[in-house]
Structures are given as structure tokens and as C-alpha cells.
Image: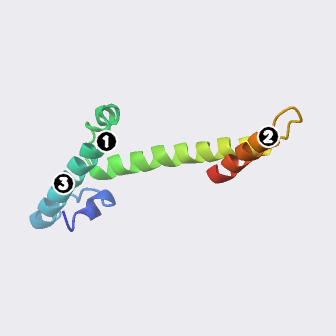
Amino acid sequence: MHGVAFALTTKKPKSVAPTKELDHWNQANKVCCHTLLNTLSNELFDVYFSYKEAKEIWESLVLKYTIESVLRQFFIIDNYYHWTMIEDKDIKVLINKYHKLLEDL
């Protein structure tokens, strides 16, 4: 498995590239694709199994989870800004909710 991570960041060499270089990339791509696909849930596997290059899978997953992370942060920050003290509720409950919001940030 060592020496194959370059397939996640490198496109397939042109067909004019030396055969040894092309074979090395193909083997690295195959290892990376299988490794990535084996770690995915069944639902995500169904989406990504048709991709031919590990670089495509990797970039798509990075984009997917980066967007999800940013949206989650916006949601948490929005909840933080809209948090208010309510006189009818117990102060301990309100403080616990406030601490929970701070932990999520």
C-alpha cells in the first residue's frame, strides 16, 4: 500500500507516457479505488463504484463532506446566536443547553 497515494492527486498519465509510469499509476489507482470503495457504506458505494479514477472519488468525497461540514457550522452558529434565556425555565437546564452549544462550536 505504500507509494500509491499519488493516485489520489494525480490524473492518469497520457498514453505517450512511458509504459512503466503508466503501469505504476494504474496499479496505484486500482489500490486506491478499492481501498476507498471498501470503506464506504452501501449507499455511498452505489454512487461511487462507477468512477474510474481514485482522484475523482477522492475529490467528490472531499467536496461532499466539506459542504456538509460548512452547513453544519452555519446551523450551529445560527443556533448560538438565537439562544436566549427564558424566565419560565430552570436556570440549570438553560445553562446546560448553552454549554452544549459551546461544545458544538
Q: Which residue type carries mark 1?
A: Leu
Q: Which residue type carries mark 3?
A: Val
Residue 73 on image: x %, y %: 63, 47
Give the label, 2 or 3, closer to the camera: 2
Residue 92 on image: x %, y %: 77, 44
Label 2 and label 3: CA atoms lie apart by: 48 Å
Vertical arrangement, residue 5 with respect to residue 60, above or below = below
Tell me whether the residue at label 1 lies in contact with that at label 3, contact meaning CB atoms closer than 8 angstroms. Answer: no
Please, which colouring scheme is shown? rainbow
Give the label, 1 or 3, closer to the camera: 1
Q: Residues within 10 Å of mark 1 (few under 14, many from 20)?
A: some
Label 1 and label 3: CA atoms lie apart by: 15 Å
**To which residue does mark 1 refer?**
40
**To which residue does mark 3 refer?**
31
Residue positioned 21% across, 68% down in the render: 3
Q: Answer with left or right where residue 5 lies relative to residue 80.
A: left
Give the label, 2 or 1, closer to the camera: 2
Quadrant in which residue 5 is drawn:
bottom left
Vertical arrangement, residue 50 with respect to residue 80, above or below = above
Q: Residues within 10 Å of mark 3 (few under 14, many from 20)?
A: some
Callout 1: helix, strand or loop? loop
